[in-house]
Image: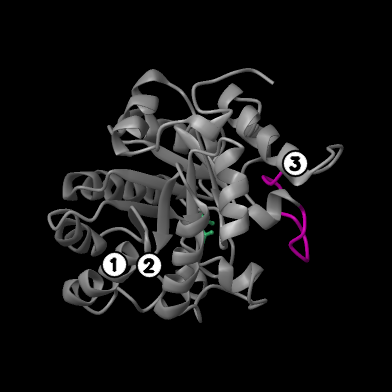
Amino acid sequence: MAESTSEGSRDRKPVDLLRIAQMHRAGEKIAMLTCYDAAFARLLDEAGVDALLVGDSLGMVIQGRAHTLPVTMDEMVYHTACVARGNRSAWLLADMPFGSYQESAEQAIRNAARLFQAGAQMVKIEGGGWTAATVHELVVRGMPVCAHLGFTPQSVHALGGYRIQGRDAGGAETLLRHAKELVDAGAQMLLFELVPSALARELCAQLPVPTIGIGAGSGCAGQVLVLHDMLDVTPGRRPRFVRNFLEGGASIQEAVRRYVRDVKSGAYPVDSLHGY
Ligand code: KIV
C-alpha cells in the first residue's frame, strides 16, 4: 500500500481543522467514513481514516429504520460519546438530527453544544438558504460546522426519494448560491450528496473550503461512505456509487485500509458510477 502522511496512523498527530485545510491546499484527498461505536472508531482511526462522521444514518444501519428522521438528540449524543471514546486521532463530526436545529438558532446552539460536550469537533447540518444564519450563530460561538447540500436525507419526503440534485441549470445555480452563502456564514467544510459529478467538480473548484462527496463523483476534496455500505452489510440494494471494499480482502481492517488508499490515490470513486 502506498505510504501517505495520514496512513499507518498509530502514531499520527490528531487531525484538526488546520491539518484538513493543509490537506485541501496540498491536494491530498480526505478519507471520511461514518462510525457509530467505540470499537469501529478505534479500528478506523488506526487504519488511517482522516475523519469519522457519527451520521444520523445510524437510524437506518443501526436501528433498522426506513430513513433518518426518527433519530433523536439523545441517540446522537450517546453514539458520539461512544465514538469519541474509541477514537484517538481522527477528526470527529456529528450530525445534528432532524428537529434539533430547524426551530431557531437558540435551539441549534443548545443541541450542538451537547454534541461537542459528547466529543464532537464539528457538527453537520443539512440544507442551504435559511441554514446560513444558523451556521453563523454556531461558528461565532466556536462550534465548527460542515454544511450538507445536494440530496439531504432529512428532506427525503420533500425531495421525493433518493434523487440526484442539481441536474438542471436552476438546481445547479441554487446549489452554488447556497454553498457560497454557507461559506460566507463560516462553514469550514461542505458535503455534497448525490450531485452530478461534473457539477460537484465545478462547485469544489470554486469553493475555498474542503468539500466531501458521496455519490458526487471524484472532484471533491474528500469522500465519505456509510461504513456498513462499504462493508456490504447494509440490507437491500447497494447504491451504484458504493464499492464493496471487503470483497476479495481478508479482514475489515484491510477493507478500511483499501478505502483510505483508494480515496487518497483517486482510484475511488469513479465518475461513471456517481449517483444512486
Ligand atoms: O448520516 C450520514 O451518514 C450522512 C452521510 C450519508 C454523509 O450524512
Residue type at tag 3 = Phe
Left or right, 122 with respect to 237, comes to left
Residue 10: x %, y % from top left: 55, 34
Tag 2 and tag 1, C-beta contact below 8 Å: yes
Magenta: main secondary structure:
loop
- Beta carbon of the mark 2 residue lies under 8 A of ligand 1: no
x 19%, y 60%: residue: 138
Q: Does any portion of residue 191 appear in the rendered image?
A: yes
Q: Is residue 57 left or right of residue 207?
A: right
Tag 3 near tag 2, CB within 8 Å:
no
In the rendered view, would you say 55 is above or below 46?
A: below
The residue indicated by pointer 3 is: 245
Between 165 and 238, which is closer to the camera in this rendering? 238
Q: Along the line of sight, which residue is nearer the eye, 257 or 56?
A: 257
Q: Position of residue 273 (x, y in %)?
A: 68, 39
Sort mark 3 into few (<14), some (14-19) or many (20+) by Cα contacts within 10 Å: many
Give the residue at mark 2. Answer: 96
Callout 1 crowding tier (Cα within 10 Å): few <14, some 14–19, many ≥20: many
Image quadrant where one finds the N terminus: top right
Tag 1 residue = 112
Judging depth in this view, the residue of 266 and 79 nearest the camera is 79
Q: Residue at x 63, y 28 (%)?
A: 261
Identified at 48% across, 58% down, the residue is: 85
